[in-house]
Image (cartoon, rainbow, N blue to C red):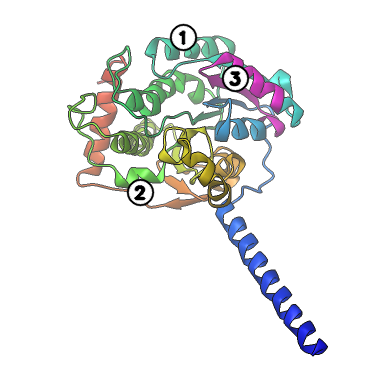
């Protein structure tokens, strides 16, 4: 009787151990690929948008710890300064953390901050276009006349990239990383005549199209750079994975009271900001991607991206449209 009882306890313990191992293994799997290469960033100059929290903050931390001077482009200065306090506690050098206030929904703000950086630096090694809005609940136009998500996620970063290209070209090698999303696969074709109109607007499509545009931008800018024999400047887009960050603040999962109910599941199933930063860091620093450009990465490996009919023609058309939309002339 006693032996049988002891055996049942042993079986019970073994089952629980097995369950715990499976649960922990799945949690490790959900973390995704990790960038473990010991690449230095000493002496490099980097610009990162949207970095007072979430993925951007983790990118800044890693770049700074590895030796880079990082310009933190944030919309809210108080939050940015609080982020610096936290980053310093985590081992960052405050002398190599510089805050620049910018609103990607205002072209004037982007031009001003770009001018400041150009005045202060003679080159730029890394540009990470990370800031973004997801599932904004209502249609809204910016002061520049563009749909808010379209301008914040795509046009704002397009303008910033164009303005900083002279600094990027001045570096021995320079890398641009645009944080896109898996959602670009679900985007309808981008109708440039309707992109800023209320008719047919949908919050999910607004986000997806902005992320598709970032992939198309990487492809077309690569073509134009190589056409000018400037292959030392590269640009790639990446999917960070599903992350438990403020980017999700407009999703149903974070609306009360559902946010309390979903908290354990979000912790278990979604990536942390640190995990979500890995592919962007990989593209910014890894020696294995030297020269790679115009690609889309997920989990630190290149993936196929959505390609529609007349892909190259549509990418070129989007680029020319974007130059006009942000107030820059198309070069003949």
Q: Is residue 294 left or right of residue 147?
A: right
Of badges 3 and 1, nearer the viewer stands 3
Tell which residue pokes out farthest to the front in this image. 1
First of labels 1, 2 by sequence position: 1
Residue at which label 1 appears = 112
Residue at which label 2 appears = 305
**Residue 204 seen anywhere in this rendered image of the structure:** yes
12 in relation to 161, above or below: below
Q: Judge whether residue 76 is colored magenta.
A: yes
Q: Residue at x 58, y 39 (%)?
A: 273
Residue at which label 3 appears = 79
First of labels 2, 3 by sequence position: 3
Of badges 2 and 3, nearer the viewer stands 3
Which quadrant of the structure image shows residue 314? top left
Q: Judge whether residue 196 is colored magenta.
A: no
Q: Mark 2: give few (<14), some (14-19) or many (20+) Cα within 10 Å.
A: some
Report helix, strand or loop for mark 1.
Answer: helix
The residue segment tinted magenta is: 64-86
Give the x, y percent position of residue 146: 28, 20
Q: Mark 1: give few (<14), some (14-19) or many (20+) Cα within 10 Å.
A: few
Q: Mark 3: give few (<14), some (14-19) or many (20+) Cα within 10 Å.
A: some
Q: Residue at x 21, y 25 (%)?
A: 198
Q: How many marks?
A: 3
Q: Is residue 87 left or right of residue 123?
A: right
Q: Is residue 26 left or right of residue 140?
A: right
């Amino acid at each position: 009787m006693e032996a049988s009882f002891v055996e049942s306890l042993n079986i019970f313990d073994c089952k629980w151990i097995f369950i715990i191992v499976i649960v922990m293994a799945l949690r490790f799997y959900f973390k995704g690929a990790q960038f473990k290469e010991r690449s230095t960033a000493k002496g490099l100059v980097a610009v990162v948008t949207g970095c007072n929290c979430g993925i951007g903050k983790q990118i800044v931390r890693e770049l700074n710890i590895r030796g880079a001077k990082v310009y933190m482009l944030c919309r809210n200065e108080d939050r940015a300064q609080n982020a610096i306090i936290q980053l310093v506690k985590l081992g960052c050098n405050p002398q190599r953390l510089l805050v620049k206030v910018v609103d990607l929904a205002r072209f004037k703000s982007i031009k001003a901050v770009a001018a400041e950086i150009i005045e202060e630096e003679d080159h730029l090694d890394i540009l990470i276009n990370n800031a973004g809005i997801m599932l904004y609940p209502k249609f809204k136009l910016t002061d520049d006349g563009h749909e808010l998500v379209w301008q914040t996620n795509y046009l704002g970063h397009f303008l910033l990239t164009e303005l900083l290209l002279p600094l990027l070209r001045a570096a021995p090698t320079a890398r641009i990383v645009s944080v896109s999303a898996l959602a670009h696969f679900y985007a309808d074709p981008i109708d440039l005549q309707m992109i800023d109109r209320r008719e047919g607007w949908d919050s999910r499509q607004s986000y997806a199209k902005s992320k598709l545009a970032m992939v198309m931008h990487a492809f077309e800018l690569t073509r134009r750079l190589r056409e000018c024999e400037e292959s030392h400047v590269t640009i790639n887009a990446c999917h960070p994975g599903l992350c438990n960050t403020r980017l999700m603040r407009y999703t149903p999962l974070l609306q009360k009271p559902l946010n309390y109910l979903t908290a354990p599941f979000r912790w278990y199933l979604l990536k942390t900001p640190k995990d979500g930063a890995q592919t962007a860091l990989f593209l910014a620093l890894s020696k294995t991607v030297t020269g790679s450009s115009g690609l889309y990465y997920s989990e630190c490996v290149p993936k196929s991206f959505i390609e529609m009919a007349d892909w190259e023609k549509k990418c070129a058309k989007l680029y020319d449209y974007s130059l006009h939309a942000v107030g820059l002339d198309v070069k003949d």
